[in-house]
Image (cartoon, rainbow, N blue to C red):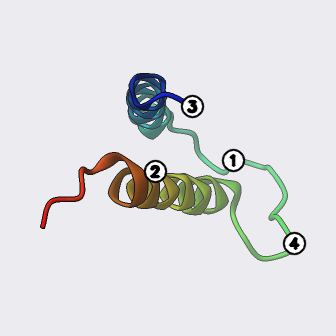
């Protein structure tokens, strides 16, 4: 994959994460996931995992390696 394509995908991922960050919902009457995890908490944990993956991608592949 070319560096330009990878940078475009990175910025699309960042914009997607920003949009997903704005999504808010309450638990309401929905059942708990696995019997103990509220859906809104599971959503936020998943979002943080995706954000961490984007950070690892950014620091591992997209930053130039200067000595």
Residue 45, position as x, y percentages in the image: 57, 63
Q: Secondary structure at mark 1?
A: loop
Where is residue 14, by image quadrant?
A: top left
Q: Which residue is mark 3?
A: 1
Q: CA distance from mark 2 to mark 4?
A: 27 Å
Q: CA distance from mark 3 to mark 2?
A: 17 Å
Q: Is residue 32 left or right of residue 42?
A: right
Where residue 9 appears, as percent x and y from the top left, is 49, 28
Q: Residue shown at 46%/53% (left/top)?
A: 57
Q: Residues within 10 Å of mark 2 (few under 14, many from 20)?
A: some
Q: Nearer the viewer, mark 3 or mark 1?
A: 3
Judge left or right: residue 13 versus residue 28.
left
Q: Are marks 3 and 2 in contact (CB under 8 Å)?
A: no
Mark toward the start of the polypeptide (3 vs 2):
3
- Which dot, 4 or 3, sits closer to the camera? 3
Front-lying residue, 5 or 37: 5
Q: Residues within 10 Å of mark 4 (few under 14, many from 20)?
A: few
43 or 57, which is in the foreground?
A: 57
Q: Which residue is mark 4?
A: 34
Label 1 environment density (alpha carbons within 10 Å; few <14, some 14–19, many ≥20): few
Q: Which residue is mark 2?
A: 54
Q: Earlier in the sequence, mark 2 or mark 4?
A: 4
Q: Residue at x 80, y 64 (%)?
A: 32
First in sequence, mark 1 or 2: give its number: 1
- Image coordinates of residue 29 in percent, x first then y, are 77, 49
Q: Look at the image and tell me in which quarter the C terminus lies.
A: bottom left
Q: Sequence-wise, which precedes: disc 4 or disc 3?
A: 3
Side of 34 relative to 57 (left or right): right
């Amino acid at each position: 994959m070319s560096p330009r394509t990878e940078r475009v995908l990175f910025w699309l991922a960042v914009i997607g994460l920003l949009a997903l960050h704005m999504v808010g919902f309450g638990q309401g009457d929905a059942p708990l996931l696995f019997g103990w995890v509220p859906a809104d908490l599971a959503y936020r944990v998943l979002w943080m995992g995706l954000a961490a993956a984007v950070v690892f991608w950014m620091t591992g592949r997209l930053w130039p390696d200067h000595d």
